[in-house]
Amino acid sequence: MSELRWQLDGLAFTIALELLGRDRLPYPLSYRPPFLEHRDDYRRLRAQTARRLSEVFDERLHRALTVLLEPQVRIEVHGFAGPDLRQVVRLHVGIADQVATVAVQQPGPDREHGRDVVLTMCYAHTAATEVVARLPRSRGGGHAPFTGRRSELERPVYSRHPTRLNPVEELNRFFRRPRSSAGEITVYPGIAYDARPTDDGHAFIWLDYPDDGRYVLVNHNADDFSVTPGPVAEMVRQVQHRIDTVQRLRAPAW
C-alpha cells in the first residue's frame, strides 16, 4: 500500500465526520467555523464546502476516516511549541488491523482551535514513526537518565551549599529551564465517542529544552517519575511500546 494523503479544511473535515455519523472531532482536534453575519451565509459556505468534499470523498477516504474513528488502538497527542508555547500540537491516530490513519491539525487562530486537518493512511507498523515525525524537531537531550518524586520538587530548600547543588535543587534546575516544546502522547484501546477523559490510557510526556534537547518523562504513579533523553529512536520506541501494551491487553486470553 502506497501512502495516501488528504488535506481538508476544518469545516470539510467536520462535514466528513458527519457523513460517518459523528458530530464531534476526535480529541484533541478542534475547529470553530468562521463567524458569519447571517445564517444564510453559513449555509452557503457549508454547501460549497460539501461540494468540494464530494470531489475527493471516495472509498479510500471513507476507509481512512473509518480507521480513524473506529480503531482497535488510538493515539492522542496534545502539546505546545514555539515562542511562549503559543503553537498547539494536535494529532489523533487510529490503528485497525494492518493499517493506520494519522490526523494532524495545523495550528489555528488561537490555542483552543485548529485549522486544516492532514490525513495520512499508512501501515500500522509505521504508526509510531509517523507520530514522532510530526512532533516539533529536536535532538535528544544530553543529561543522563534520572528518577525523582514530585513531592521533592515542592519541598522547600532551607540551606544551600556554596559549591554544589543538592538533589532537590538539581531537580528544580532541570525542570525550570525555558522550554521550546512540551506535550503528552497517550495510547488507548478502542474508540473514543467523545472528549471525556478515561483512565485506560498509557502515556508519556516529551519536554524540549532549546539549550539542550528532548527528554521523555514517564509517570509511574502520582509521585514517582523517570526522565530519559528522547532522541527519535527512543521516542519511537516509547510510542511503539505503548501500542504493543494496549494490543496485548486487548487480545483475548485463551
Image (cartoon, rainbow, N blue to C red):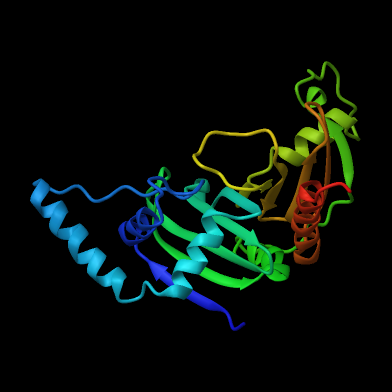
Query: In this rendering, is residue 24 above or below 2?
Result: above
Q: Position of residue 88 (x, y in %)?
A: 49, 50
Question: Which one is in front, 72 or 101?
Answer: 72
Which residue is at a point 80% across and 22% down the rendered structure image?
A: 151
Please identify the quarter of the rendering in which residue 24 is found.
top left
Q: Looking at the image, which is closer to me, 158 or 192?
A: 192
**Quadrant of the rendered structure where residue 224 is?**
top right
Give the quarter of the image for residue 117: bottom left
Where does the image place residue 157, in percent across and percent down from the top left? 81, 20
Position of 83 compared to 202: left or right? left
Q: Please state if 51 lies on the left or on the right of 144 as rendered.
A: left
Q: Position of residue 215 (x, y in %)?
A: 76, 51
Residue at 15%, 49% (x, y): give it. 36
Q: Residue at x 70, y 49 (%)?
A: 206
Q: Nearer the viewer, residue 173 or 89?
A: 89
In the rendered image, the residue lying farthest to the bottom is 2
Q: Quadrant of the N terminus?
A: bottom right
Q: Please state if 99 lies on the left or on the right of 219 as rendered.
A: left
Considering every residue shown, the one lying at the far front of the view is 254
Q: Return the x and y of residue 7 as percentages of the image width and height.
A: 41, 70
x 23%, y 69%: residue: 51
Count the numbered circles shown: 0
Which is nearer the eye, 187 or 213?
187
- Relative to 58, does residue 232 appear above or below in the rendering? above
